[in-house]
Image: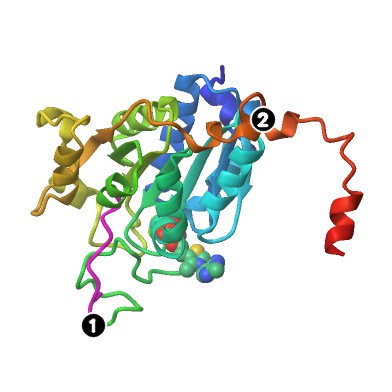
Amino acid sequence: MADVKELATKHTPTWCPGCGDFGILTAVKFAIAEVGLDPDNTVIVSGIGCGSKLPHFVKTYGFESLHGRALPCATGIKLANKNLNVIVITGDGDGLGIGANHFMHTMRRNFNITHVIQDNRIYGLTKGQYSPTTPKGRITPTSPHGALEEPVNPESWAIVAGATYVARGFALDNLQLRRLIADGIRHKGYALIDAFQMCPTYNKENSMQWYKEHIYKLEESGHNPKDKMAALAKALEAGDKLATGLFYVEEGKPVYEEQLPQMKEKALVHHDISKIDVKPFLERYM
Ligand SMILES: Cc1ncc(C[n+]2csc(CCOP(=O)(O)OP(=O)(O)O)c2C)c(N)n1
Ligand code: SF4
Ligand SMILES: [Mg+2]
């Protein structure tokens, strides 16, 4: 079992002071330690963005992939070795914009992975363009007259697409966030944790104070996370208040990687391929 201190690396984050990525990093490390994941058997996969630097700061295996492609890489890793613990970290732009196609299909397949979205409602790394979760009407360098689109609601997308664990946290409510991530890791199936975070450099509107004034906790509202329609209603809730906590959980749904006959007995990486003659296959395609 990992001690949280042993999960530190020699690298130091270069995030801006006050960035919510610090809180999410802390929550991820504490969740890994709490669940007792073996760092040698754990891989954190990210895309590209400010927050996607996270794998550099946790002493597990790490894979910083391409913008929008964290989920296909995580899928490939899980297919090669289903025994690995796979945690995916993406920004809101990464996971819900360029990577939205992968997001929907990975949830539909119910891979056993945990996906944390660092949701600062902006493209941070590329200097403040509007993102899929930027509120309608927000003025940014790419929406000088106000963003025209309705923002993406990740929780409702996830519930409808077939995710089996759907939660939302806040970078500064670290105890709640680490519990949601830890439970997401323990959950067998696709777990989404949408983590609200501040970007004090490019998103001045959704500040720490703003979140504190708008957030309320689902567990204090009598919500039943096993009720799919109630979860969807909570996700789509209109108005000034934003719920955090566990929206939806469904146990027992088969995970994709365990339904493949080739992997029933053991992971692909443990198959003996030394006696397979690949020459006929190569000749067929050369
Ligand atoms: C294929 C491709 N398109 C665009 C980019 C440029 N790019 C890098 S990060 C990024 C957006 C990052 O926003 P988000 O995913 O929300 O992460 P944040 O920086 O806010 O943490 C963009 C557009 C890229 N690297 N690759
Ligand atoms: S630009 Fe925003 S998201 Fe990126 S490090 Fe700075 S505060 Fe964090
Ligand atoms: Mg972002």
Q: Report how far apart the C-alphas of labels 1 and 2 lie in the structure.
A: 52 Å
Residue 125 lies in the magenta-colored region: no
Highlighted magenta segment, given as a residue range? 146-154
Is any part of residue 14 visible from this angle?
A: no
Provide the residue designation for mark 1: 145
Where does the C terminus fall, quadrant-wise? bottom right
Horizontal side of residue 218 vs 81, given as left or right: left
Amino acid type at circle 1 is His
Look at the numbered disc 2 and give the secondary structure of its residue. Answer: loop
Whether residue 276 is visible, yes or no, is: yes
Quarter of the image with the N terminus in it: top right
| Three-letter amino acid code at the position of disc 2 | Ala
Pick the residue in front: 156 or 144: 156
**Which secondary structure class fits the magenta region best?**
loop
Identify the residue under disc 2: 267
Q: Residue at x 40, y 64 (%)?
A: 97
x%, y% of residue 124? 42, 62
Residue at image point 67% right, 30% down:
267
Residue 63 x %, y %: 62, 46
| Circle on res. 209 | none
Which one is earlier in the sequence, the residue at label 1 or at label 2? 1
User: Closer to the camera, 130 or 99?
Assistant: 99
Instruction: Classify mark 1 as within 8 Å of ligand 1 or not, answering yes or no.
Output: no
Comparing marks 1 and 2, which lies closer to the viewer? 2
